[in-house]
Image (spheres, rainbow, N blue to C red):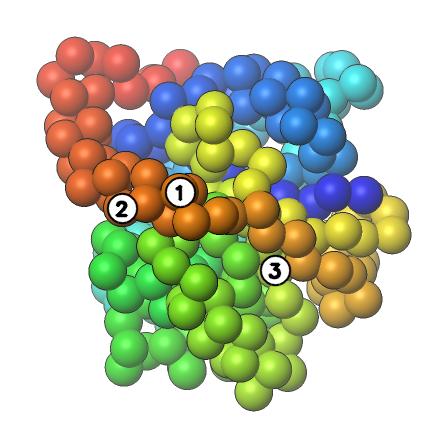
Amino acid sequence: MRLDLHNHTSFSADGSLTPGELLDVAKARGLDCIAVTDHNTVRGALRALALSESDPSLPRVIPGIEVFTAEGEVIGLYVHEEIPKDTPLDEAVARIRELGGLVYLPHPYDVFRRGAVSGCARDRAAEASDVIEVANGLALGPRAGAKSERLAARQGRPRGAGSDAHRKRQVGRSYVLVSELPTRDTLVKLLAAGKVENRLRFWDYVLNWGGQASAPATRVWRRITGTLSKE
């Protein structure tokens, strides 16, 4: 089973795919299960979950949220409720657990990217996490992933992977091969025995730098034009 743990929809200010479009592309790319982790909202995840549950041919959906905490981003998987932006990291982690979720630390060493966890909080965030992302489809270079691998090993945490897709071409870049579809109770164990697959090549990293530079303008434009999903 191909499991992609980090994706965005048009409910993120810099995402371009509706929940339905994300699921259709994920299906075409051979993904069996995806986490939908929009910035600071679960609305896209819940919409994708409803679509998936109504159509068994679509990939299964893990609802989640990527929270911009005071110390950088952290993801809650199997979360169905909002967590306020700029919540302190420790409080966000506690809230994810209160909601019955799992804590997933995304791109911990992509320090040039907006939202990467701060260096002074990185080890604390990793220790508090259930899963550490070691392959991210929007990485700016391979060194960040190698450092994340060492962090996961040092903390004794299973390795996660996610495309961090915001656009169609980015879907399915990074995922974990697992033996069966996960549940909240089996995900960590499945990842510990899984195999990380990362399809990024040289030109993908080059394009990621361009996307990183254009993302602020995309966020502003979508708010001005009213194309940020509000349904």
Residue in the picture at 60% in, 82% down: 153
Q: Secondary structure at mark 2?
A: helix
Residue 54: x, y in percent?
A: 74, 15
Which residue is painted at 50% across and 38% down in the image?
7
Front in this rendered view, residue 144 or 97: 144
Q: Dot 1, how many residues are within 10 Å of its Cα: few (below 14), some (14-19), or many (20+)?
A: few
The x, y position of residue 22, in whole percent, is: 54, 23
User: Which dot marks residue 62?
Assistant: none
Tag 2: residue type? Trp
Mark positioned earlier in the residue sequence (1 or 3):
3
Q: Residue at x 34, y 54 (%)?
A: 140
Real-space Cα separation, disc 2 to disc 3, in angstroms = 22 Å
In the image, residue 52 lies at what x, y percent?
Answer: 70, 22
Label 3 sits on a secondary structure element that is: strand
Whether residue 214 is visible to the viewer of this picture, yes or no, is: yes
- The residue pinned by badge 1 equals 203
Total labels drawn: 3
Per the image, the residue denoted by label 2 is 209
For mark 3, what is the residue? 160
Whether residue 117 sits left or right of residue 143 in the image: it is: left
Q: Quadrant of residue 125?
A: bottom left
Please, is residue 174 above or below residue 144 in the view?
above
Q: Amino acid at mark 3?
A: Gly
Mark 2 or 3: in front is: 2
**Residue at (73%, 21%) from the top-left corner?**
58
Task: Decide which of 165, 47 is in the foreground and name it.
Answer: 165
